[in-house]
Amino acid sequence: MSAVDSNRPTFKKYLWWAIFIILIIFAGFFYFRYYYVFGEGVKSGYLNFAVKKGNIFKTYEGKLIQEGFGKSAAKPGIASYEFEFSVESDSVFKTLEMNSGKYFDLHYKEYHGILPWRGNTQYVVDKVIGMR
């Protein structure tokens, strides 16, 4: 065996680098898909319900009914839109649970993907801005 052969990178070294690069790509994809905040904003409307549900992961879910004017092929006029969301914080959920039926301004974050322990929707409400 010559000195040139001992300095040559081995197949194992290439394999470990390939695995490392694949793991970095996978971690980046996972972060982008499940933890990167795609959008955030405020939705306003009447709170229809706030519940805690789930088989394995108990999550907080809610629905906001938004009113507005809209055009429908069937009948133009007043239309209602539903905003289904998840809640991570216990304190935000308690506020929603105790005030069902009231008008809320909710700040939310939108993610590309859904994680079972975060909720059933890609919209996660993180704070209550206003309530009346």
Image (tube, rainbow, N blue to C red):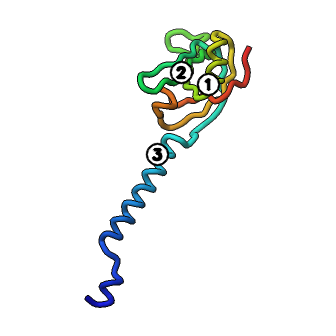
Q: What amino acid type is highlighted by mark number 1?
A: Asp
Q: Residue at x 61, y 28 (%)?
A: 89
Q: Nearer the viewer, residue 71 or 132?
A: 132
Q: What amino acid type is highlighted by mark number 2?
A: Glu
**Helix, strand or loop status at disc 3:** helix
Q: Residue at x 69, y 24 (%)?
A: 128
Please identify, in this view, whether the residue under mark 3 or under mark 1 is nearer the observer: 1
Residue 100: x, y in percent?
Answer: 63, 11
Horizontally, residue 104 falls left or right of residue 59, namely: right
Q: Which residue is mark 2?
A: 61
Quadrant in which the N terminus appears: bottom left
Q: What amino acid type is highlighted by mark number 3?
A: Phe
Q: Residue at x 50, y 40 (%)?
A: 34
Q: Which residue is mark 1?
A: 90
Label located before the other in sequence (3 or 1) = 3
- Alpha carbon of mark 3 to alpha carbon of mark 2: how far? 24 Å
Horizontally, residue 113 falls left or right of residue 110, namely: left
Callout 3 touching callout 2 (CB < 8 Å): no
Horizontally, residue 38 falls left or right of residue 7, namely: right
Please identify, in this view, whether the residue under mark 1 or under mark 2 is nearer the observer: 1
Within 10 Å of disc 1 (Cα), the crowding (few <14, some 14-19, many 20+) is: few
**Helix, strand or loop status at disc 2:** strand
- Alpha carbon of mark 3 to alpha carbon of mark 1: how far? 26 Å
Residue 20: x, y in percent?
Answer: 41, 60
Q: Which residue is mark 3?
A: 30
Within 10 Å of disc 3 (Cα), the crowding (few <14, some 14-19, many 20+) is: few
Residue 7: x, y in percent?
Answer: 35, 83
**Helix, strand or loop status at disc 1:** helix
Residue 17: x, y in percent?
Answer: 39, 65
